[in-house]
Image: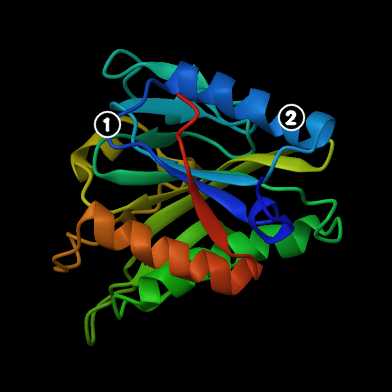
Amino acid sequence: MQSMSETSKVLWAVSQAPVDYLAAKQAMEAYARNIRKDNAPEMVWLLEHPPLYTSGTSAKIEDLHDATRFPVFDAGRGGQYTYHGPGQRVAYVMLDVAARGRDVRKFVADLERWIIEALWSFNVEANVRKGRVGVWVDRTRSGGPLREDKIAAIGVRLKRWVSFHGISLNVDPDLEHFTGITPCGIDDPQYGVTSLIDLGLPVDMADTDQALKQAFEAVFERSTRPAAPLV
């Protein structure tokens, strides 16, 4: 029998191989329902997807530049178009926001802080920007024009105060794949996309997962325990 301290921990699942998007989405949504319906433990599920684009509830069709390049899915989350693919760590976050005070703004801010703290473990100074969703790195050269690149995206949905979808952090994806969309609707050339490898850091997915785990426990003030992926 598991102790109360074990059952109160957030489940932490990691998929080692790329996961089909629709299978992951269906499993995630079903598990989120079970958190409210059956008091299932909260879960964070780390995975990668094959190359694909997803659209959020605010997506504009003109921001999809090549609809035939990769599969395109309606994610049902907030936000606009985004890319997922190998080398990008996706974290689906199924948490009970009602038990965390029903403060959606704080919850989103905590997701942002989670990414920022994880990146700081690699000495990457990243932050959020007013009016631009996600987490950004300043790459402006001395005396040059402003240049900021997005390194992580956030897109969540809440149903009955349980969250699903979550974040995506660029570790070593093919950055050229982002050109098939206008990422998050931002087309200003001074704003681009980057990754940990693009920043010159010899970081792999295991390093990233460990940084995310440590930062999650610090920001959300809950310990984790390993669990099997949902699919």
Name which residue lies at 65% across and 71% down: 221
Give coordinates of residue 82: x percent, y percent. Answer: 43, 37
Nearest to the observer: residue 174 or residue 180: 174
Determine the secondary structure under disc 2.
helix
Q: Is residue 19 above or below residue 214?
A: above
Residue 209 visible in the displayed image: yes
Tell me the kind of residue under disc 2. Answer: Asn
Which residue was labeled with disc 1? 17
Tell me the kind of residue under disc 1. Answer: Ala
Give coordinates of residue 20: x percent, y percent. Answer: 38, 20
Could you tell whether 95 is left or right of 147 in the image? right
Residue 34: mark in rendering:
2
Screen quadrant of the N terminus = top right
Nearest to the observer: residue 141 or residue 198: 198
* Residue 48: quadrant of the picture: top left
Separation of disc 1 and disc 2 at Cα?
25 Å
Name which residue lies at 32% across and 55% down: 192
